[in-house]
């Protein structure tokens, strides 16, 4: 397929490359040794042990672009590219995903693209590229100023004073100035390149360098679900499912984006000279259509970014968009340290209580009433009508089964049945549509409020602190608490509510009073639950219900079997020839009476089965409330005696089917102590001496991290294989459910097969984490891709904590896992 737009993009990109290539052409110059300090200027690249950030102001073709670049170990990388005229972000590329402001299609495009920013000498010329690289190609940040200035050594002039060192070169083709600190190694403070020979002259300036500083607030992925609500949006992975015309438009957008030309279109809309240069390359760039898309998209995009904590006004206003106390913390980058996960500030929040007390909840309730509750009475009336009609349909089915009906009567009853059934379907469809809309609205409102809470919690780290906020009200998929015990000293729920109600982030002063030597332990609540007498009692009650009800059900089924045989016998006799009319009528009468008894008996059997199931569920649900409550009470008593501050469930799983504390190493295990305590005569029976007084560890000795396991599944061969296996498992279970011989053992075998595949990937991820070189090892790594019953990860907020996701993906991929 011929792609004119691809050629346009390549032409633009080549022009950019040629302009910058004029800065260095080593083959045309005489080489001399540059000052030693120039070679010591550090290369800023992915994989560095220390974080760095900088800004790049780029003026080319009369177009002004600004790039903000951030890197932090183990593998956090971000590039935001903005229109220099007003600061509007044209590209946000973070850790393997990119969101592009696309005026060709008039929407925000999301793709699996790696952030990239490179300035270095390669093959004797300057390699200058910015933007993204497609999935499968390794995106990178690689900025090597020393390589450029070293190649200009013949024309280089250097000076040095108490403020730092300066190196400059100048020629008719290019000029450059490198300013660095006087420290060792010398760190860049500003770098300027000018190409006077370009028309108009090109200028690229790097400044706002920070080293060892915390990740800036804008360095984060965008929430796609929230984004969809705010702006026209398209995921490039879905492109194959679109109509051909839309596919071609998106294909054009893709080529422009990969070549860097996408980022020149919007600035050119506002600059006639720049537009003429681009229009001269191809008539395929329709600027009138771009102007229309710009009007529709820009305001929505700005609003969407503000909702997600990225304020374009702050991006344009200063060297780096840092708010409040965070700016003061970053003012001295030389003394800042890259977060390593050692002894972060650990606090807890009752997310359920904060959510319920959020000021937006009252507004949400009013909105819900206006949208859905106002016509609830009418909906309930329709549901009642549908129920009544469904009963009438069942009654008509019984009549239609009577073989004595004439054809005309059968047709009339069948028509009546179809009309009633059709009305039932219409009511059910309307009800389902309203319920779906209601659930979507609730989910969107829930996410909106949670995002607001998370945004407020991020204020805790504005002083540069490493902070983890755990949701103490969260439960695992087994309905047991994830934070089994936490001390009052860790609690910040009221402070969070106060800040949220005032519309401000929580002050970092809140964590000043939180102890930094917390005593921590763990417990396997799954094992506890299955090992204590309280659970046995619940199971015994369930077994008794099943035994007693099954006896009654068996007796009823035996009776119905006898009755069914009698009905079949009578039906056969009625069909026999040789019976006179009085005999046939008598047998029909008996047959109808027996058939009614059979139908009544079947209905009563269903009621008994329903009552059994209801009683079974009530006992089980009551047990799932009572037993975890008693487990928590037992742990709390042991914790108070032991002086523990935090006890976590070491095995509780989230919605993704993996442990919320995915990596749990070197933490004292209280499981056997809790089992022993709960199996005693009463919770009060144990003496204080039985408490595990020495079985805690101080948080100052522990290292924490986070990992998004859902991204691991999406980014590794084993993960992709598991997803295929999961789809197969779902299909097998559906197929099995459709069969009459739906054996539970077969279902369990299929489920366990899929479970084993998932567990093997979890084990492999844990092995990667455990094998990391250097001390100390990671002790607790929280999984952030899955959710608790509150709809968030257990670590509801985390700042300046090592994210091990990319490291694990890379290691597993290299191993073919």
Image (cartoon, rainbow, N blue to C red):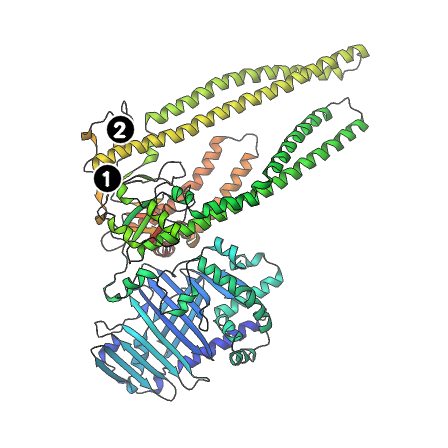
Q: Residue at x 25, y 66 (%)?
A: 332
Measured in 3D between alpha carbons, the distance from the residue under mark 1 to the one under mark 2, in whole angstroms, is: 17 Å
Q: Which mark is residue 813?
A: none
**Is 167 on the left or on the right of 112, as rendered?**
left
Q: Is residue 817 visible?
A: no
In x, y percent, where is residue 809? 38, 55
Q: Residue at x 23, y 49 (%)?
A: 516
- Circle 1 crowding by C-alpha within 10 Å: few under 14, some 14–19, many from 20: many
Mark 2 falls on what kind of element? helix
Q: Residue at x 23, y 55 (%)?
A: 774
State which mark lies toward you, 1 or 2.
1
To which quarter of the image does residue 573 belong? top right
- In the picture as drawn, the residue positioned furthest to the front comes out as 502
In x, y percent, where is residue 165? 24, 79
In x, y percent, where is residue 63? 47, 77
Q: Which mark is residue 677?
A: 2
**Is 285 on the left or on the right of 131, as rendered?**
right
In x, y percent, where is residue 423? 69, 36
- Circle 2 crowding by C-alpha within 10 Å: few under 14, some 14–19, many from 20: many
54 or 563: nearer the eye? 54
Residue designated by label 1 = 644
- In the picture as drawn, the residue positioned furthest to the bottom comes out as 172
To which quarter of the image does residue 118 belong? bottom left
Q: Quadrant of the N terminus?
A: bottom right
322 or 428: nearer the eye? 322
Q: Is residue 614 above or below residue 257?
A: above
Q: Is residue 579 above or below residue 13?
A: above
Mark 1 falls on what kind of element? loop
Q: Is residue 294 visible?
A: yes
359 or 102: nearer the eye? 359
Q: Is residue 713 above or below residue 632?
A: below
Q: Counting residues from the N terminus, which is met first, the one under dot 1 or under dot 2? A: 1
């Amino acid at each position: 397929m011929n792609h004119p737009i691809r050629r346009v993009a390549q032409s633009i990109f080549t022009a950019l490359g040629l302009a910058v290539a004029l800065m260095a052409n080593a083959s045309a110059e005489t080489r001399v040794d540059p000052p030693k300090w120039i070679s010591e200027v550090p290369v800023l690249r992915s994989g560095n042990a220390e974080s760095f950030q900088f800004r790049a102001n780029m003026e080319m073709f009369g177009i002004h672009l600004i790039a903000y670049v951030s890197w932090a170990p183990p593998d956090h990388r971000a590039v935001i590219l903005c229109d220099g005229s007003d600061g509007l972000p044209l590209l946000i590329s973070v850790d393997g995903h990119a969101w592009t402001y696309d005026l060709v299609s008039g929407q925000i495009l999301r793709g699996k693209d790696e952030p990239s920013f490179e300035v270095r000498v390669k093959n004797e010329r300057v390699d200058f590229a910015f933007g993204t690289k497609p999935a499968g190609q390794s995106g990178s940040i690689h900025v090597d100023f020393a390589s450029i200035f070293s190649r200009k050594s013949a024309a280089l002039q250097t000076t040095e004073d108490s403020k730092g060192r300066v190196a400059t070169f100048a020629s008719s083709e290019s000029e450059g100035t490198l300013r660095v600190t006087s420290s060792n190694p010398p760190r860049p403070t500003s770098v300027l390149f000018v190409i006077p020979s370009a028309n108009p002259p090109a200028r690229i300036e790097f400044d706002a360098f920070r080293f060892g500083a915390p990740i800036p607030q804008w360095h984060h992925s965008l929430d796609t679900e929230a984004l969809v609500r705010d702006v026209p949006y398209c995921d490039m992975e879905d492109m194959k499912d679109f109509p051909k015309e839309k596919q071609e438009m998106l294909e054009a957008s893709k080529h422009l984006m990969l070549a860097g030309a996408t980022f020149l279109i919007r600035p050119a809309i506002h600059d006639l000279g720049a537009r003429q240069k681009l229009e001269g390359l191809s008539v395929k760039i329709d600027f009138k259509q771009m102007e229309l898309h710009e009007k529709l998209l820009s305001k929505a995009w700005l609003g969407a970014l503000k909702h997600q904590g990225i304020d374009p006004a702050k991006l344009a206003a200063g060297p780096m968009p840092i708010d409040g106390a965070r700016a003061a913390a970053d003012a001295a980058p030389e003394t800042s340290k890259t977060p390593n996960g050692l002894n972060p500030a650990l606090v807890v929040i009752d997310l359920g209580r904060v959510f319920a007390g959020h000021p937006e909840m009252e507004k949400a309730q009013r909105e819900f009433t206006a949208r859905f509750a106002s016509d609830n009475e009418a909906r309930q009336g329709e549901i009642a009508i549908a129920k009544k009609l469904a009963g009438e349909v069942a009654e008509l089915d019984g009549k239609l089964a009577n073989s004595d009906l004439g054809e005309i009567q059968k047709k009339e009853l069948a028509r009546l049945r179809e009309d009633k059934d059709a009305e039932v379907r219409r009511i059910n469809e309307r009800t389902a549509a309203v319920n779906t809309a209601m659930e979507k609205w609730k989910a969107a409102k829930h996410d909106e409020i949670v995002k607001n809470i998370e945004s407020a919690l991020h204020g805790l780290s504005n002083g540069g602190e490493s902070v983890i906020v755990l949701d103490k009200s969260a439960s695992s998929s087994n309905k047991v608490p994830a934070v089994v015990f936490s001390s009052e000293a860790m609690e910040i729920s009221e402070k969070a509510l106060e800040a949220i109600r005032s519309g401000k982030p929580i002050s970092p002063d809140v964590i000043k009073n939180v102890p930094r030597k917390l005593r921590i332990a763990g417990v396997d609540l799954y094992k506890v639950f299955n090992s204590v007498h309280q659970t046995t009692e619940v199971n015994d009650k369930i077994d008794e219900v099943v035994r007693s009800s099954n006896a009654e059900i068996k007796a009823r089924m035996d009776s119905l079997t006898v009755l069914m045989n009698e009905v079949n016998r009578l039906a056969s006799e009625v069909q026999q020839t040789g019976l006179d009319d009085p005999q046939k009528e008598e047998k029909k009468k008996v047959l109808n009476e027996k058939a009614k008894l059979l139908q009544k008996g079947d209905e009563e059997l269903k009621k008994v089965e329903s009552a059994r199931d209801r009683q079974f569920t009530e006992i089980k649900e009551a047990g799932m409330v009572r037993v975890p409550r008693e487990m928590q009470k037992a742990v709390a008593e042991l914790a108070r005696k032991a002086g523990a501050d935090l006890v976590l469930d070491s095995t509780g799983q989230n919605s993704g089917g993996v442990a919320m504390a995915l990596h749990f190493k070197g933490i004292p295990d209280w499981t056997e102590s809790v089992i022993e305590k709960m199996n005693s005569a009463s919770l009060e029976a144990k003496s204080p001496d039985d408490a595990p007084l020495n079985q805690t560890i101080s948080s100052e000795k522990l290292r924490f991290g986070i990992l998004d396991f859902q991204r691991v599944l999406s980014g590794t061969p084993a993960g992709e294989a598991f997803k295929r296996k999961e789809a197969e498992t779902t299909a097998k279970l559906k197929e099995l459910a459709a069969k009459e011989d739906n054996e539970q053992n077969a279902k369990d075998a299929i489920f366990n097969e899929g479970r084993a595949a998932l567990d093997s990937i979890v084990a492999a991820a844990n092995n990667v984490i455990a094998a990391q070189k250097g001390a100390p090892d990671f002790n607790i790594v929280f999984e952030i891709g899955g959710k608790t019953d509150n709809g968030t990860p257990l670590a509801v907020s985390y700042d300046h904590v090592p994210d091990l996701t990319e490291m694990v993906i890379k290691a597993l991929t290299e191993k073919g896992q």
